[in-house]
Image (spheres, grey):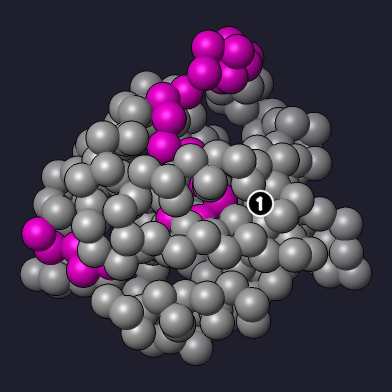
Amino acid sequence: MCDARLFDAQVAALDATVLPVTGAETVPALAAEVLAQAPDRFALGGLSMGGIVAMEVARQAPARVTGLALMDTNPLAEAAHVKARRQPQMDRAAAGGLAAVMRDEMKPNYLTDGPGRAAILDLCMQMALDLGPEVFLRQSRALRDRPDQCATLRRFERPALVLCGRDDGLCPPARHELMHDLLPNSTLTVIDGAGHLPTLEQPEKTTQALRRWLEET
């Protein structure tokens, strides 16, 4: 439930383009939308759900992806206990409770403690409300039904960056160590002073890691 503002610092520093992952309710369909808008060849990065879509892009069109940056994300299919929480959240959001879902069940898991926490949480809420409940429902279905991408990562031989905040409670560092081990040509970077959203919590450190990766692609 984030838009291009998630990457404001990186877009400015790296001349990047941000594509939405809001228009479909399956990960394969979202990846197809990205591929329809992307150049013939491109380096691709994604954070959280964006990383999940990025892995599917690499599965569908590996020859087009010159490098892959996976940030605070998860290559595995959704666990049963997480699936069990999806429908109540979706029902609540569809009934007009999107702000409450974000406030009570999602935002508390996003960030580490720090001086910018309150402002970043406010931005997260604004992005979610701007996208609205229909996007929340589509993204929830896509995440719930997503495929496992471990085999995709094993096959991806181009330069890859695996990056996460050290205090990410949603996609912890151990999950990123798994991705690093699966990818044949990857660098693992763990950002101190960040949780699930290092692009906002530690934008300079995150941009530096992305710049080093882009130099390899």
Front residue (pair 171, 6): 171
Looking at the picture, how far across and down is residue 113, in whole percent? 88, 57
Determine if the magenta segment contains residue 78: yes
Looking at the picture, how far across and down is residue 158, in whole percent? 24, 63
Front residue (pair 64, 187): 187
Which picture quadrant has residue 46? Answer: bottom left
Determine if the magenta segment contains residue 186: no
Which region shows up in magenta? Answer: 63-88
Q: Residue at x 47, y 75 (%)?
A: 210
Q: Is residue 58 left or right of residue 15?
A: left
Number of other residues with Cα within 10 Å of mark 1, as a class: few under 14, some 14 to 19, many 20 or more: many
Q: Is residue 72 above or below residue 83?
A: below
Residue 3 visible in the picture? no
Q: Is residue 121 above or below residue 216?
A: above
Residue 64 visible in the picture? yes
Q: Residue at x 75, y 50 (%)?
A: 167
Q: Is residue 22 above or below residue 8?
A: above
Looking at the picture, how far across and down is residue 209, in whole percent? 52, 76
Residue topped by disc 1: 196
Front residue (pair 31, 129): 31
- Amino acid type of disc 1? His
Q: Residue at x 35, y 84 (%)?
A: 215
Which picture quadrant has residue 56? Answer: top left
Front residue (pair 94, 119): 119
Q: Is residue 106 left or right of residue 119?
A: left
Q: Is residue 23 left or right of residue 57?
A: right
Looking at the picture, how far across and down is residue 48, in whole percent? 51, 48
